[in-house]
Image (cartoon, rainbow, N blue to C red):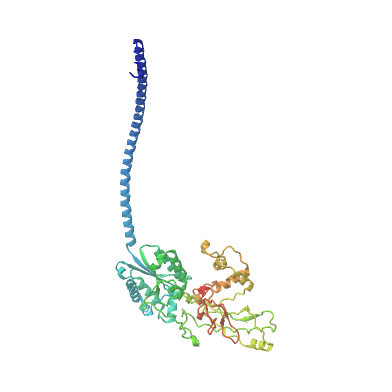
Amino acid sequence: MSGEPFEQAPPRPTFETTFNTFVDRYQRIQAHRDTTDELIKDVLIYAQNIHSTLAAENADLRRQVGDLQLDLSHNVKSRRELQQQVHELETENELLKTANPYVAVLIDGDGLLFKEHWIRQGIDGGRKAAAELRAAVLDYCGSQAGRLEIIIEVYANLASLSRVMKSDGSIDNEADLGNFFLGFSRNTHCTFVDVGSGKEEADERVRETANWHLRNHNCKHVVLGCSHDSGYAPFINNVIRRDGRDRQRVSILEGFPTHRLLKDTGLNIMSFPDLFRSDKLVDRTFTNGKHSKSAYNHVVPNMEPLPAPAPTAPAVPVPAQPAAPSPVQVQVSVPAPAPASYAARAMVKSASPPPQMTLPIPPKPKPAAAQVAQANKPLPPAWNPGPRGLDPPILYSKAVMDKIKTRKENDKLCNNHYLRGPCAKGNDCCFEHNYKPSEEEKKAIAFLARLNPCTNGQYCELENCIYGHHCPSVEMRPGQPPKCTHPYCKFEVEDHPPGTVFPKARKDYDNY
């Protein structure tokens, strides 16, 4: 046998130790069972609470889902009804826009004149002229002509225009024009409106009516019979700026050649030479030599022969000492833009003798003998620019004028506000209204306003008109031709005395 020791067997348990062991084991198992039961009871209680909470929440959610389903159903129904209403309204709106489409022809009848052969036919001529004009406008409409209506409105001072055309020889009887427009108005959608004798009434009515039609979707186009009057240019430019689409909705109807300012707007120009006269009216009542049959720019013939100019005082001799400029007696004429309305001119009284105006003009140094000879030379014959005559002279201070001219842009003083009263544009006016000018400054403002031609020119009937009715920048010296000293003169050549010398490069006043 080897030397390794034998393993000893465990001692055999006794009865007592075995029983105690069972008791211990039972107690341990019992404690574990109690813990397990507690755990199971806690889990059951927790599960019961969770179940109750979830059941309540589930019931609430079911209620909410039911409500939402009702709301959804209602909203779907409402949306469909709204969609149907929107569709119907869109259809109705489109029908309203496209139903009864028309073209509005608005004519300033004081300047755009029908040819005399139509007018001489009286009522029958008016009816025929309206039909011809309607057909001519429809022809311009092309493929759309079949669905368009033509609305024609003519605005004019009937009484004055009748007298003017009779004096011109265009008609034999003043009643012819009234009969013509009576026949004209008997055509469907053709209307003549006698605006009376107010200043620029026809112009104002044309502008207001054009604005009304342009706001109407049924109006597809507006034709303005105003080619003779540059005063419509600001209105047209404002319309174009307000809505660029209106550029395609407005055209100019031409009789007398379209003024440059109107051409510059870029609008389409329509011309119907068989209907409207393009020549100027001629005053055939003049019988004094070269004036007997002379054509003027929009001359109104219903005037008596102009009175002979009053004798003028001789020029004041200029002092021999040239140190300081001395006043020189000169005759000044004030121009106006070519009168735009024939009718407005028929109401002006005969011209008054031209006044003289003293302006500070520094003379060149001359020998005393030459000065005396110059002083003894007669002044040029007094110029009478037309029925209204020369505007009253305005004497102003050069220093004050220079101060007024330094104002730029929005700082410029508003002529209308300071010379006529509160400006009608109010806060929309771009010029200064709050400044309080002195009397001398008001004179300077008045002279600057005089540099702008009056729309009606020599046929303006407004006594206190602030604008010029002939060029105020003309110098008339003994032995010399009249000279226009304004490089940006806004007046037409015929608004200056015959033979007036202009600056070599007469500049475009639009850039002034």
- Percent position (x, y) of residue 403? 62, 70
- Percent position (x, y) of residue 133? 35, 73
Q: Nearer the viewer, residue 35 or 462?
A: 35
- Percent position (x, y) of residue 191? 37, 69
Residue drawn at x 68%, y 79% is 324
Left or right of 389 in this view: 170 = left
Q: Work out whether residue 212 can be spotted.
A: yes
Q: Work out whether residue 397 can be spotted.
A: no
Is 476 rendered above or below residue 69? Answer: below
Q: Nearer the viewer, residue 433 or 290?
A: 433
- Percent position (x, y) of residue 361? 63, 79
How many numbered marks does the figure carry?
A: 0
Is 159 rendered above or below residue 307? Answer: above
Q: Quadrant of residue 208?
A: bottom left
Quadrant for the N terminus, please: top left
Left or right of 508 in this view: 131 = left
